[in-house]
Amino acid sequence: MEHAPGWLTGSLVYLAAAVLAVPLARALGLGSIIGYLAAGIVIGPWGFGFVRNVQDILHFAELGIVLMLFLVGLELEPRRLWSLRRSIFGWGSAQVLGCAALLFLAATLLAGQPWRVGLVAALGLALSSTAIALQVMGERNLLSTSSGQAGFSILLFQDVAAIPILALLPLLGGAGDAGRSPDGAGWLEAARIVAVVLAVVIGGRLLLRPLLRWIARSRTPEIFTAAALLLVVATAASMQFVGLSMALGAFLAGVLLADSEYRQELETDIEPFKGLLLGLFFIAVGMSIDFGVLLASPGLMALLVAGFLALKALAIYALARWIELPAQERPVFVLLLAQGGEFAFVVFQAATGARVLAPQAASLLIGAVAVSMLLGPLLLVLADRWLVPRAGPRRPAPPELSEPQHAPVIIAGFGRYGQIVGRMLAAQGIQSTVLDHDADMIATARAFGYKVFYGDATRLDLLRTAGAASARVLLVAVDDVEQSLRIVDLARRHFPQLELVARARDVTHWNELRDRGVTRVEREVFESSLRSGRTVLEVLGIAPFEARTLAVRFRRANLQLFEDMYPHHKDRAKVIAVTKQARRQLQEQLAQERAASEARQREEERRRGAAS
């Protein structure tokens, strides 16, 4: 292939290496990431040498991380960010600051490094690999577990924390330059970074949605896909222009579109590119491992890798105990976050450019991070065999729904609410396709003879497999409010023929469902609360028939109150006024009826007394 173009030979090498190495690694129980990394080592400069321009490939493959962070941003609606504020900013800051503090003390006190070098090394090594962690959690179906949610929140905080870390580097470089100009170039650089971030946020809010709406009107799917890729690349390029990570720009773009009507289309269009480019990124990481640095100072490299992994593992294990993760989930949680991350490459390279780190120190730190990313998946395999079994049995997640279903009813969520509906339908001989992502609950339900499939109903492909295109009814019975709204949005856009029946957790959830056009909404504890109230009245001496009548009257009035409040539910003062007025009217009406009833009783007693 002497005269073949470079893109052709490169594609042949990368695809062949991945196709051979990844299935082999999976067959050996090592996971796909180890396969990609091993493939990169084999074809890279320290293997057969099929690829020499490793840095060019690594830069291009970073687009996989960019696309992944864009998809992560799409999940981060402002409301969800607020609901996860404790786990993201509490646990995330505890992980980053705790790990950075231990690493900083080790670098300055034990290794004798200057404080600026120790600070940059500690902050860079405190970050974890979002790419590897999310990939592993996805493969193991851990995202729905407590450790998966905690890990996801911490990784989100790390992605956000990278912004101030990178903005800090020019200041550290300026602080150490005795001959710097008096105009404060470091501060100007930081101000320029902040200005660009604000411009991306404000401009994105004002321009992105009208632009996507205009492109969508062309009704050309491939152009919308191209526009989605252009959006990610353009935002990432603007951040790269001022020296920030491309992935951070993509993350901001995703957040800006998290609550837009085009979120599902963007996720569907970007996902295939993300998977392919992430695989290429892992191959490039394997190729980029500089075995020359490793062979030149093997003892120092081994001490550095073992030291920072041990210190991070210590801090993260303490965090896992503090947030009370199940014991059997802690080993995987610790190892996923203990390894170095891809953002460390950016931090250390930027620190070299800012003259905070010497090139030799940066190469050593980058090599240590790359080695840790290679060792991380291997340590996970060892943990699965030695640590996890000793921590206690963990029920493995069942395989996802893969065979197409054709039942007329789909039930999303089979907890306490969905189970009752499913049992009622089964009693009438009506088939339903049940989806849930709680492995323990699925195992329990199957033990009682219920056919429940494992899967996340917020995924478009899974809903299609479940038969949403031909089903008549979709019951949204999941516990989580955000997941419920995402399922409704997905069904409304892609399966308009479905009749939606939804469970509302509270009044706010009820209003949000109504805003989306769902009219068949039931509050989850409303009817049972009415029954309890009726029982209390009977215990207090009110006749059962009268207690039942009062409960029916209250139910009718409450449902009417909801309908009266709905047009004003975004005006808190109006809602309060309508509620108070309706409550006062009901109390007055019931008081009048009680007075009339008591008067009738007295009149009947008087007549009986006169007759006797």
Image (tube, rainbow, N blue to C red):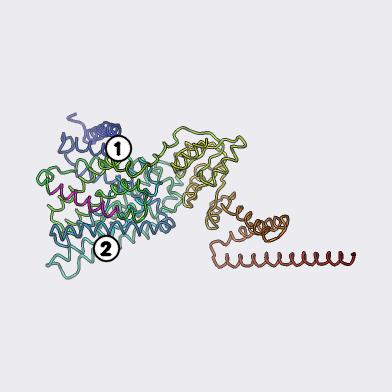
On screen, residue 493 above or below 240: above
Q: Are marks 1 and 2 in contact (CB under 8 Å)?
A: no
* Location of residue 255 in the rendering, given as x and y in whole percent from the top left corner: 38, 54
* Location of residue 79 in the rendering, given as x and y in whole percent from the top left corner: 44, 57
Residue placed under numbered mark 1 in the picture:
31
Which of the image's four quarters has the N terminus?
top left
Residue placed under numbered mark 2 in the picture:
192
Q: Is residue 303 magenta?
A: yes
Q: Secondary structure at mark 1?
A: loop
Q: What's the CA distance linking mark 1 and mark 2? A: 42 Å
Q: Nearer the viewer, residue 359 or 95?
A: 95
Q: Specify the label residue 211 is tagged with.
A: none
Q: Which residues are magenta?
A: 300-317
Discs 1/2, front: 1
* Location of residue 39 in the rendering, given as x and y in whole percent from the top left corner: 23, 36
Q: Quadrant of residue 238?
A: bottom left
Which of the image's four quarters has the C terminus?
bottom right
Q: Amino acid at mark 1?
A: Gly
Q: Is residue 584 left or right of residue 456?
A: right
* Location of residue 506 in the rendering, given as x and y in whole percent from the top left corner: 54, 56
Q: Amino acid at mark 2?
A: Arg
Q: Secondary structure at mark 2?
A: helix
